[in-house]
Image: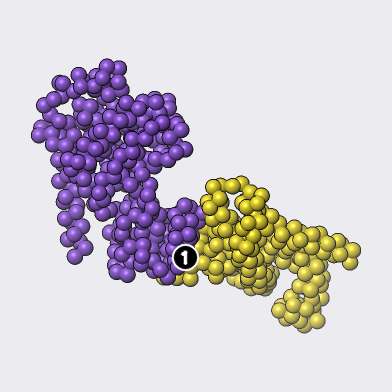
Chain colours: A yellow, B purple
Amino acid sequence: MGVIFDNASTYVDGFVVTLRLTAYAGALALVLGVIVAGLRVAPLRSLRLFAAAWVEVLRNTPLTLVFFFMVLVAPQFGILLPLGFWTAVLCLGLYTSAFVAEAVRSGINGVGVGQAEAARSIGLTFGQTLREVVLPQAVRSTIPPLINVLIALTKNTSVAAGFATVELIGVGRRLSTANAGDPWVLVGVAAFYLVITIPAGLLASALERRVAFAR
Amino acid sequence: MTTSRRLAVALIAATALALSGCGGDGEDTPPATDGGDDGGETAEFPEGSTMARLAEAGTITVGTKFDQPLFGLVGPDGVPEGFDVEIAKLIAGELGIDEDDIEWVETPSQNRETAIENGDVDIVVATYTINDERKQRVGFAGPYYLAGQSILTLASNTDIQGPDDLSGKRVCTVSGSTPEGNLLANFPDVDVVPFGTYSECLEPLRNGQVDAVSTDNVILAGFAAESDDLEVRGDPFTEEPYGIGVAKDDVEFRMWINDVLEEIFADGRWTAAWEATAGTVLPTPEPPSVDRYED
């Protein structure tokens, strides 16, 4: 157990990287995911198809494979991304965007069809309908599942440890090697993940209760 | 320039292999079997010793790697090749056993102690690092080679000739590995880039995203042997003594193998075996000195 306190500052270094990965990748995923969800309900068939393909490909691909593709395969096609943090953000953001899109789409589907029809009948464009009428109502039921997506993202950042990014898991592996495989090292790593995921989970349940009440 | 050197290396390797191949047939028998005293061999060994038993049987079971380029690698013909394999042949030769009478058994890292304890193999020559933990279960003759952490870089790279040139460079290794720990502890100016496996380091190395790859020279040599564009640079900067595993309580056999090793270190057969195999990619070192430790 002492190993955790002795190396507290090393843990914190890794924790900060994990936190930054989660924050940047989460922001990217939210932006991309909302756009893709919008495209999935777009009036143009080609846009709907593009968005559906985006979601299905990314959602059904193991995250490790997304990393492999970006880090080891893309260079063979002339796409040379900088190794490390920002590539990890890109991979995590792309992957998570598919899950965000699905959460947002289910929220959109939860808004009565009559709302969109009414909006169109008073002359709002598709964009306006989505922005002014549907999305504000969809957000309510979307936030709790989105928090779950972000919790999954937090844990998924660990995949970056195998691709030139030293975050919590990377730090944990180093400490484990330096301390002859002391099992407490990994307990410490788990504890730092919980620092992010448990409050997020509590926030999700609290919001869920508020949403249910408001209905 | 590189091509011609490579050609020369290949030629030397081919000649050496051809020579050792002939040796087995007992034609001029250079390194392995010491021709004439084959008959007297059995008598040399003390009654009841492992050496006497093996010499009598005329066969020996050797555990080695089947997948380690330059040390123990099975080719398409099913016969393992490499430095470990050559060392085993030399030992078998001293017992009067022809190399065609050696039975090769694959011993991956996690099976080596068990194979020796169960008596599945007589000796293990399989990039087998001597350490105290393993000495609890098996005996080690040797070391017959000191492996260690080294550096792999592009053949075209002129900046990096050894570990001292790594300062400020991006060096790829495996996350959480001992070589990563060594880099972090001993080379604070190195920018360590951790991946999941060593082979994943090669693509970034070729793309110029990292400057070098660092781990045990034996692993690096395997990569260099497979691709012309990669080279191992400098001497190892850590020490992993490779030993020959035998049954723990068979001290007599262990000491006899030590005698054989000292002999082949002295008469150049060790160097010849090295140059024909791992020496095609790695620099030729001085032979190590054997460790006749007491239990």
Give B83 or A119, whichever is nearer the viewer. Answer: B83
Residue A94, visible in the rendered structure: no
Give A32 or B280, whichever is nearer the viewer. Answer: B280
Viewport quadrant of the C terminus of chain A = bottom right
Give B111 or B235, whichever is nearer the viewer. Answer: B235
Relative to B164, is A124 above or below? below
Give B77 or B138, whichever is nearer the viewer. Answer: B138
The x and y percentages for residue B173 are 44, 58
Give the quarter of the image for residue B161. bottom left
Kindly identify the residue that appears in the image at 54 percent across and 55 percent down. A174
Relative to B244, is A148 above or below? below
- The residue positioned farthest toward the front in the image shown: B294
Q: Is residue B265 left or right of residue B294?
A: left
- Mark 1 belongs to chain: B
Element carrying mark 1 = loop
Kindly identify the residue that appears in the image at 48 percent across and 59 percent down. B185
- The residue positioned farthest toward the top in the image shown: B47
At label 1, which amino acid type do we have? Pro
Kindly identify the residue that appears in the image at 47 percent across and 63 percent down. B193
Residue B237, visible in the rendered structure: yes
The x and y percentages for residue B50 are 30, 22
Q: Badge 1, how many Cα within 10 Å: few under 14, some, many 20+?
A: few
Give the quarter of the image for residue A145. bottom right
The x and y percentages for residue A183 are 61, 46
> For mark 1, what is the residue?
B188
Q: How many marks?
A: 1
Q: Is residue A118 left or right of residue A178?
A: right
The x and y percentages for residue B196 are 49, 55
